[in-house]
Image (cartoon, rainbow, N blue to C red):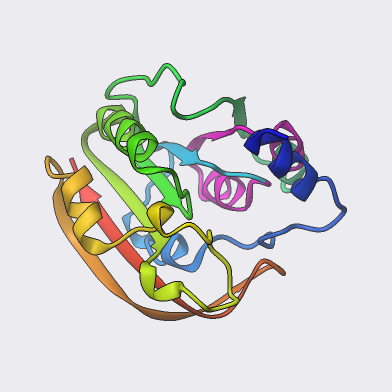
Amino acid sequence: MSDAAAWDTRYAGGGFAFGEAPNRHLAAQDWRLRPGMRALALGDGEGRNGAWLAGRGLEVTSVDWSAAGLAKAAALAEAREVALRTVVADLVAWDWPVDAFDLVAWIFVHLPPRDRAVVAAGAAAALAPGGLLVLEGFTPAQEGRRSGGPRDPLLLWSAALVREHFAELEVLECLEGTVVLDEGPKHQGPAEVVRAVLRK
């Protein structure tokens, strides 16, 4: 089974694996958002972040390799009466637009090192000048916790990796530590994360 097929299976149920509410770190950036901003939600799955951004008046593109997830994202947006463009694609192979977005939301997207570097370069290029990258990911300290995240340590983030992959961006915030997740059945309880906001 391919990874995309595995996520299709995960998203095939009736509920929302990570809930319908936006990621708290992303929602905390509400004060930085303006209607009409162009936003890209990476690995947006069932659309909780993309639909929320669309509800704030942003023009949102949600990209994920799970067609099942994005079908639910489209339904969520329709139920909220907001516009959401969905694109089924592998971020590693995607034809990234350049200078096209005012915001890129990278929320719990965990990739092998080589793929992560490719996608990070694409995301940075996709930001328009002055655009913001909002990122949250699990760190190696998450090992042993049951609140989510990949088991392979090579897929995990750190503040150092954020600074390395996005060296050309200005760091506005970049913190590692413990948070309490309440994001659907798959993200529950204390978790070790890095949260960052960067600007092109």
Look at the image and tell me whether residue 60 can be seen. yes
Instruction: From the top left corner, tell me how far across and down residue 190 is, in percent.
Output: 51, 83
Q: Quadrant of the N terminus?
A: top right
**On screen, residue 199 above or below 124:** below
Q: In the picture provided, is 30 more to the left or to the right than 180?
A: left
Q: 146 or 75, which lies in front?
A: 146
Find residue 54 and report its horizontal and vertical position in percent: 56, 43
Left or right of 114: which side holds 40? right
Q: Above or below — where is 145 with respect to 109?
A: below
Q: Quadrant of the C terminus?
A: top left
User: Which residue does the image show at 17% across and 48% down from the upper left?
Assistant: 164
Report the front residue among 31 and 198.
198
Residue at 46% in and 21% down: 94
Q: Give the residue displayed 33% in from the left and 66% down from the top.
A: 194
Q: Give residue 172's quadrant in the image.
A: bottom left
- Furthest toward the right, the residue is 14
Horizontal side of residue 149 vs 123, given as left or right: right
Magenta stretch containing residue 54, yes or no? yes
Asked whether residue 78 is in view, the answer is no
Residue reaching furthest to the top:
95
- The residue sitting at 61% across, 32% down in the picture is 65
Whole-percent x, y for residue 128 in the image = 25, 30
Q: Which residues are magenta?
A: 46-72
Looking at the rendered structure, the number of numbered marks drawn on it comes to 0
Question: Which percent across, then down, holds residue 146?
Answer: 60, 76
- Residue 177 occupies which quadrant of the picture? bottom left
Q: Is residue 3 magenta?
A: no
